[in-house]
């Protein structure tokens, strides 16, 4: 009897695996449109898009893979047109879905939140994809326990057309974890490049460059929580919508308990920050309440314009190329920061700058 039960289970598992199908979409394919393929898809299926232009669709099945054909050149599989359900080009309600190798262009909806991908299910992975001129790049609903991962993707020209709305390249609402790695963000307007309300946010090895944009924060973690921001190139452009902050942490936590994530370790490590904005810019601004101290280590500060404060609020700073912020030391600061120095020598340099300014101040008071 035990042998029969094991055999039955093995046969059931094998038949479930065998039932997964590959559904092709495009000219001379099984399905002419993505909507047809989405309706036909079953859990575990793979939907393959041929090069060319496709309209969006709503995906309900779990464990889907939606990807460009292996023969497609990067950027040759493009989804654009009317947003689905006034939400986005892809609306994904299924769980454990992977999207790979697809370009999303021009998502717009009346409320200004038109997304390239609107994630309503649990666990989404986006790989090697491109987002151009959408109001939102990737927008997730609040789904407890969900993990959203973005790898090797590019976000360009994110801007909301809605009145009193802003567009974010990646916006994660209340989920367990957001992971963004090896991706490129540029030419945003008014909104933030990455905004995360996740319990934990990991942002590593990305290039977030607002040189030709007018975005607000480069990274916004308004509800606090655990965070690792490491090995990124972060550039504050010359025309930002928000003048004075690059990374904002905990800015909404004072609005009430519902806006606060549980505290967790916050590490901002080995990033290169280039300031091209005029005036004084804070690299990492911490307004967490209750206070959740951040650790900043080995970040490189380069002031091509203006001046930089490495951190405000509760933070421990080590190994920093810390710029002077006193007006009398501004000229000296620009000399020290270009080219950048190692953390130890920069600290020594700014100690000397502070000593010089202190002596000048003492002399003036005598």
Image (cartoon, rainbow, N blue to C red):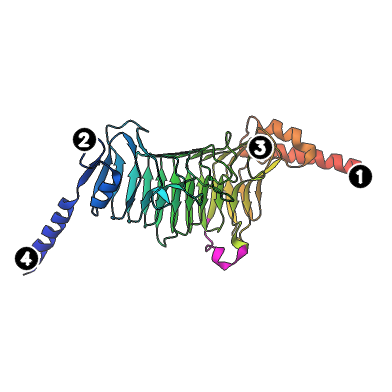
Q: Nearer the viewer, mark 3 or mark 1?
A: 3
Label 1: element kind: helix
Quarter of the image for residue 30 reads top left
Measured in 3D between alpha carbons, the distance from the residue under mark 2 to the one under mark 4, in whole angstroms, is 45 Å
Measured in 3D between alpha carbons, the distance from the residue under mark 3 to the one under mark 1, in whole angstroms, is 34 Å
Residue pictured at 55% horizontal, 58% vertical: 224
Magenta residue span: 255-265
Task: Please tell me the numbered disc located at residue 365.
Answer: 1
x, y percent for residue 4: 6, 65
First in sequence, mark 3 or 2: give its number: 2
Image side of residue 5 versus residue 273, left or right: left
Neighbor class of circle 2 (other Cα within 10 Å; few <14, some 14-19, many 20+) is few
Residue pictured at 81% horizontal, 40% vertical: 357
Measured in 3D between alpha carbons, the distance from the residue under mark 1 to the one under mark 4, in whole angstroms, is 95 Å
Residues under numbered marks 3 and 2 in contact, where contact means CB atoms less than 8 Å apart: no
Residues under numbered marks 3 and 1 in contact, where contact means CB atoms less than 8 Å apart: no
């Amino acid at each position: 009897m035990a042998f029969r039960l094991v055999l039955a289970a093995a046969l059931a598992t094998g038949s479930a695996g065998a039932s997964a199908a590959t559904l092709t979409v495009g000219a001379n394919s099984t399905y002419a449109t993505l909507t047809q393929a989405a309706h036909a898809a079953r859990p575990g299926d793979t939907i393959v898009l041929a090069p060319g232009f496709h309209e969006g669709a709503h995906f309900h099945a779990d464990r889907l893979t939606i990807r460009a054909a292996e023969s497609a050149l990067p950027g040759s599989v493009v989804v654009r047109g009317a947003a689905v359900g006034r939400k986005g080009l892809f609306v994904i309600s299924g769980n454990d879905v992977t999207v790979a190798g697809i370009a999303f262009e021009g998502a717009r909806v009346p409320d200004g939140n038109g997304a390239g991908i609107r994630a309503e299910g649990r666990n989404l992975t986006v790989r090697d994809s491109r987002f151009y001129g959408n109001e939102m790049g990737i927008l997730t609903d609040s789904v407890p326990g969900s993990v959203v991962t973005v790898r090797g993707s590019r976000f360009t020209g994110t801007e909301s057309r809605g009145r009193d709305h802003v567009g974010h390249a990646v916006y994660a609402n209340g989920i367990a974890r957001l992971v963004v790695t090896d991706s490129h963000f540029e030419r945003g307007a008014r909104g933030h490049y990455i905004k995360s309300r996740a319990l934990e946010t990991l942002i590593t090895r990305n290039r977030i460059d607002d040189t030709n944009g007018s975005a607000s924060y480069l990274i916004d973690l308004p509800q606090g929580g655990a965070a690792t921001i490491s090995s990124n190139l972060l550039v504050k452009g010359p025309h930002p919508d928000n003048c004075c902050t690059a990374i904002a942490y905990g800015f909404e936590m004072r609005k009430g308990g519902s806006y606060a994530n549980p505290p967790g370790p916050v590490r901002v490590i080995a990033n290169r920050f280039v300031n091209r904005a005029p005036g004084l810019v804070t690299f990492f601004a911490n307004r967490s309440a209750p206070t959740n101290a951040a650790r900043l280590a080995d970040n490189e500060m380069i002031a091509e314009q203006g001046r930089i404060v490495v951190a405000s609020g509760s933070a421990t700073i080590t190994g920093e190329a810390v710029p002077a912020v006193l007006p009398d030391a501004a000229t000296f600061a620009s000399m020290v920061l270009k080219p950048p120095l190692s953390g130890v020598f920069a600290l020594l340099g700014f100690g000397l700058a502070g000593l010089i300014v202190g002596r000048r101040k003492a002399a003036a008071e005598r």
